[in-house]
Amino acid sequence: MSIPLLSTLIFFPVLGGLSLLIVPRQQTATIRLMALFVSLVELLLTLPVVLLFDKTTARMQFTELHPWISTLNINYSLGIDGISILFLLLTALITLLSVLVSWEAIHDKVQEFFVALLLLEGAMMGVFCATDFFLFYIFWEAMLIPMFLIIGIWGGPNRIYATIKFFLYTLVGSLLMLVGIILLYQNGGHTFDILKLAGQNYSLKLQLILFWAFFAAFAVKVPMWPVHTWLPDAHTEAPAAGSVILAGVLIKMGAYGFLRFSLPILPEATQQMLVPMLVLSVIAIVYGAIICLAQTDLKRLIAYSSVSHMGFVTLGLFALNQRGLEGAILQMINHGVVTGALFLAIGMIYERTHTREISAYGGLATTMPVFAGFFLLFTLAAVGLPGTNGFIGEFLILLGGFERAPWAAVVAASGLILGAWYMLWLYQRIFFNEVSTSLHGLTQLNLREILTLTPMVVLIFWIGLYPNALLGFLHVSVGHLLDQVNGVGLAGPVLPPVNLP
Amino acid sequence: MIATVAVNWAAVEPILPELLLITIGVLLIGCDLFLPRQRQLLPWLTVIGCLTTLAMILGSRPTVAFGGMFLADGYAMVFKTICLGSVILSVLMSEHFCRVIGLRQGEYYSLMLFSLVGMLLMASAGDLMVLYLGLELMALPIYALVGLHKREQRTSEAAIKYFLMGSFGSALLLFGMSMVYGLTGTTEIARIAELIGSRQLVANPALLAGLGLLLAGFCFKVAVAPFHLWTPDVYEGAPTIVTAFMSVGPKAAGFAIFGRVLFVGLPELHGHWGPVLAVLALLTMAVGNITALCQQSLKRMLAYSAIAHAGYALLGLLAGTAEGMAATMTYLMVYLFMNIGAFAILMLLATPDAPCESIDDCKGLASRNPVAAALMLVFLFSLTGIPPTGGFIGKFYLLKAAFIAGYPLTVVGAVLFSAISAFFYLRVVRFMYMEAPQQTATLQFSPGMRAALGLCLLGVLGLGLFPGSLLNWTVSAFSGM
């Protein structure tokens, strides 16, 4: 290996963020430009990774291995496979857009904000690259600090309650996972290497204990019902950039954790716990969607819709077949794009009106037609209209879910209908009807804002019309993962990967 | 035995660092008396003396001196480093703080050094007598240090309380030692283990009573619940600088003798002391963390947090394994930097008319002084145990050691209490970053303060990112014992 690409991806934003500290605090314009530059370069740095990535193997690529804490056999080991590579792209893109959306929205403690944002980006990259469980945990927990500050310092009126709730929920889950990691270390040959930890025959009892220990961390992060209650508060109170990162990347990590750790390391426990997990997923889908119908707060509604959408993701995961898993991963990306876009859009409108109450809006289509057009696209993608990315993901998940457990897919499908209901109703209340008096004279979207939203529109249609661009990365790795899960008993129906146009 | 009148320098060599410190302590008193105008040099003289001692200790070869009474082994070396570190960091910050609260500086530094000699003796104690001698030598100057601020009522109360409770703890310890001595006929710690084995004393009720008294005495010294009741009042009443020092140095020295007696003297009784300490550790974490939740005084909150941290450090001890003790040492090393760092910010905020002690005083610190706030943030997250800080590595190592030694439920309890602790540490972060400032006075960084804060930050982050060499050191230190 010549250039350690993954380390660069992790530490470039960290160093970039720290270099912002050199700039005098008053020069906010310089700080913003530097943050933009760093996040843009970071996005460009993901390109060589994507271009050089070999789609035909499930092995870890771009691996780096250095001994770190030799006493405990902990290594600084990085690597990505088809499952993680997409998240690197997503993280880089979402962070760049977060910088753009914070351009004017953040005017207090600007320096601290962008430092926190870039450090967060480094930690997120680390989570997706780490192939050592301990290293993973370090990045996983390190993310908490900047996110805690971003919500707590730059958030809405109730931000302190929200951020402490977020921190404590995540911390309790993570610490239980830490105990699980130690237990796994003790029984898995005193190593933290996740490739070596997988494929060992742990006793079923041990697997079940570990499954629930990991569940504590991952389910809180996803968030699955009934540990989702931090999400609406955190999403609602976070500044636009915080909401975008939460929805776009952070909550994907829970599902990623299931994919990377629970499934391959604990295959038997996963299969034992299949039904409870499917039930929780279906409850999240329907419950989240119904709660959406009762929301009066714009961001809170989108937050609950995330609960519902992430229910689809976990449904696809625990369908444990090629279609379900691929759908789930694709849907994670889709949800990152679409919900990220919705929060970006809401951030823009909030900057103008300073209210999140749905009832305060009305007739926005008349005053801000361009914005209405963007929002309509995002709404349709969130609903899963064919031709948009949302459709592909949900369709694959339902297909996979139906093969595994028809009842789950049937109930989950009702979530689609509810989804169309609350999203379209939301659109109607905000953009149609009489023009609300407070909305007169709003400024149109400026160039920066249009440039922020455009990549999302492109992605929505690109994935919607040519999903294989992303699915191509997944086939082999997901197949390998399924072999690991199905290596013991319960041979699920092995289906050829779907070749969508 | 030293039979001749002439001093046998070769025999004295192992205690040269201690002798050097005593010399400097006396010198400091002299300087204070005869060179009152040069008083600002005292802290630097103290720091240089400590650094020289540190270098001597780190450079020394492991030796057994005075017929096994004084052990200069790797184990002692680690603890001595921690104790010296606590004195160096405190002294660096002292000048600034003493000036702010108007504390006479003269005898302050020499008292600190004499106490330090006591701690070094404790770390090296190979015999119960030396152990007790060190303990008292450490404690007496601290009683005086706690009451040094004569004009303030609280400190006198704290000093008296600490003196009474400390004497009581020492009495328990002595009682326990005498029972062990009565049964085994020796005060040499290593011999005790042999004799317990050869005389089959493991199930002897008198020995168990002795063990119980020893445990109670040690728990007094390191402030483990239910023997912690003196701690909050004393920590709150003492001048903040003394609190910072006391919460680290003497505690580490206490753990040094605790570990030495249990691991070398009474390993055969692990079946008894292991579970007892597990219960005490859980109780300590519960008391420390839950009581800290509802404190309005930041100093008192840190006092309770110090109690909770003694509970975490016990995790390694109760494991009864080499890895466990190494974990405790590692943790105390990290704790040195993060705890003194947090107290340093507290001292930085103090002004002559308002000794910053309430959490409200932190309000808006991030707007008043971003650097101080960021430092405090790092120290608090480290105390919580969030990576990439040293606090996480230390805590992880402890949890792992206790888990592998067969105390999974204790570990789960520890983990939950550490989640609870996040709440009160975060409350300070919240006040610093998310509230408007109440005061506008600018903060003064004295050179010593800068150096101390820099060292603390370096320690916390350095040990968080590159803990490898420290872990190797503590592991090898223990195996050499």
Image (cartoon, rainbow, N blue to C red):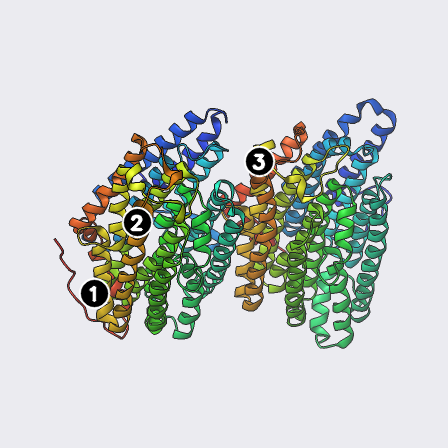
Label 3 crowding class (10 Å Cα cut-off): few <14, some 14-19, many 20+?
A: many
Which callout, 1 or 2, points at the residue further toward the start of the chain? 1
Q: Which residue is mark 2?
A: A427
Reply above or below: B430 against B266: above
Is any atom of residue A46 visible in this view?
yes
Q: Chain of mark 2?
A: A
* Secondary structure found at label 3: helix
**Are callouts 3 and 2 both on one chain?**
no
- Give percent across and percent down for residue A366: 28, 39
Which of the 4 quarters of the picture holds residue B189? bottom right
Q: Which residue is mark 3?
A: B366
- Give percent across and percent down for residue A115: 45, 36
How far apart are labels 1 and 2 at the CA level? Answer: 29 Å
- Give percent across and percent down for residue B361: 67, 39
Q: Chain of mark 1?
A: A
- Quadrant of the snapshot with the N terminus of chain A: top left
Which of the 4 quarters of the picture holds residue A418? bottom left
* Secondary structure found at label 2: helix
Amino acid at dot 1: Leu
- Give percent across and percent down for residue B157: 85, 49
Q: Chain of mark 3?
A: B
Label 1 crowding class (10 Å Cα cut-off): few <14, some 14-19, many 20+?
A: some
Q: Which mark is residue A399?
A: 1
Amino acid at dot 3: Ala
